[in-house]
Image (tube, rainbow, N blue to C red):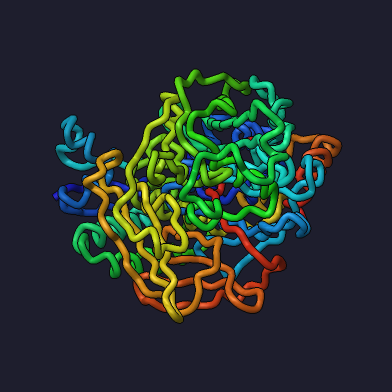
Amino acid sequence: MAQEDLPFEVIVTILMLLPAESLIRLMCVSKAWYALITNAEFIQNHLQIMASRGNEYILCGPIKVFSPAKSDLLCAKDPNFAYKMGVPSTFDSRHCLHVSSSYGLVLMSGAYNFGKTLYLWNPCIRKYKCISSSCIDIKKSNRLGSSLVVGFGYLNQANDYKIVRIVYIEKDDDHFLDEDNDYMDGDDHDDIGGDVNEIIEMEIDEDISASKAESSSNDDRTTEVEVYSLTRDSWKKVEIQSFRWFLCDYFTRAFVNNCVHWMVFYRRVNEDESMILAFDLEKEAFQQITVPHYEDDVAEYVESIVHKEALGFVVIYPQETTELCSLWEMKEYGLVESWSKVFNVEVGGTIYRPFTITKNDQIMFKGENQGLSLYSFQSQEIKTVTVKLDSDELDFLSTVDSLILL
Amino acid sequence: MIVLNSSDGATFEVEESVAVQSQTIKHMIEDNCADTSIPLPNVNGVTLARVLEYIKKHAEAKDDEEGLKSFDAEFVKVDQASLFEIILAANYLDIKGLLDLTCQTVADQIKDLTVEEVRAIFNIMNDFTPEEEAKLRNDHAWAFE
């Protein structure tokens, strides 16, 4: 008896279980299949299924500006398997940084003039969209000492991807010519980088870290904030009363509860208070979150991350031959009392920055000899992943398999 | 006990509590169409037997996750024609678990196949002109390497 044809609705069910790469090929099967695979609803449903099954890839890319812009795409469930992929040559700068990823899309920006031109990229289907416009006079940020900070996330209810951009615009160029830093009021600061542990060293624009520790009066600069929506494909300015925080990072990957989170410090008279600054992409408003208590004089590194869909806070304390890694989770978002310590583990050896904490409770970082190391919280062992990676210093970003931007 | 009649005249008895894993059968029972037996003109005897094997196992070993996993893995080791028959039956009888399992199996089988191989499996006519198809392949050349 001849094989019966499957009804189209069943074929749809089957296709929704395929990885994006296969679907790109199968668009050629017939016009009906092409129409289906490029249909917006199909793409949404497919993405939902991929996300719920944890079908992710981990993008490993170079963080040093002068490396060739090549990335490896690893299958998260089996990191021994990798694809090599180049960043599209038509990107503005050959040296692109992976900023952040959310629900199938990766935000990238040129390493030079960071934040000026942004790209939304889907590495699974190798398609990107360039976002160069702005509604703030970005030319003002051309001057030395201005800087751009970005955050990115997907809003489930609105079904929209949004980018927030904070632009610090220095009013007066002369501040940067002043070697003695007379304009600073901080008497308890010998060295900006040393005192504020949270500042991450970026290879680009080192002058920026000096400008960030200026007087809290904000007389010297204005802060402007704008939000981009992929659905509208346009930017919109956000009205803010006063911006009292100093951001330590150029970008953030901690997106949870519709908010992006940065480590910041708030300049007080006697000391700086470090905290997490959250920006709600839906409400388009800022809020402060107090961090759990930790020994900030001995901590080497702190970061706000997302751990198992909750806001997390990581602190790394260097010990003699090991590193102590503490991870807190905010069990109830926004409730400071709900910070609870999830891990307090001693890792033999050094956890090289940057690292990522995967969904399987593993810390993934660049190990010795071009390999990748995985430290598992459960087994408390470091394993080496055998895939060979090109770059010297790696950055990791996980992204869900999807057809978005097709 | 419920009595089911396949398209080719075979009869099967199954407990009602097991049979209602099929939403179609469940609705028929609720609508009182099931007094003597339920005719299933879309499913042949061989396939119906296999489907019943699935729902019986999933009813009795409900909590044994490991056991069910290995049962499912063995269950789908059949030739393609039979697999498609089971899919059609699961779709008609509206048995979600079985449909998910068989669809995932087919997805795994086709994910690395060429376009021509997939057309053959699903018996689909290529309605693109050679130029149209060439353009599509060119636009996404990386996927065809």
| Residue A20 visible | yes
Residue A315, image x, y percentages: 40, 60
Question: Which residue is at the front of the view, B47 or A316?
Answer: A316
Question: Which residue is at the front of the view, A159 or B23?
Answer: A159
| Residue A406 visible | no
For residue A292, above or below residue A169: below
Residue A390, image x, y percentages: 72, 68
Question: Which residue is at the front of the view, A260 or A19?
Answer: A260
- In this view, the residue farthest toward the right is B131
Within the image, what quadrant is residue A223 found in? top right
Residue A178, image x, y percentages: 69, 41
Q: Residue at x 77, y 46 (%)?
A: A88
Question: Which residue is at the front of the view, A211 or B130?
Answer: A211
In the image: residue B2, left or right of residue A150: left
The C terminus of chain A sits in image quarter: top right
In the image: residue A14, left or right of residue A91: left
In the image: residue A334, left or right of residue B62: right
Q: Residue at x 65, y 78 (%)?
A: A369
Residue A232, image x, y percentages: 59, 20
Within the image, what quadrant is residue B134 found in? top right
Q: Residue at x 39, y 70 (%)?
A: A324
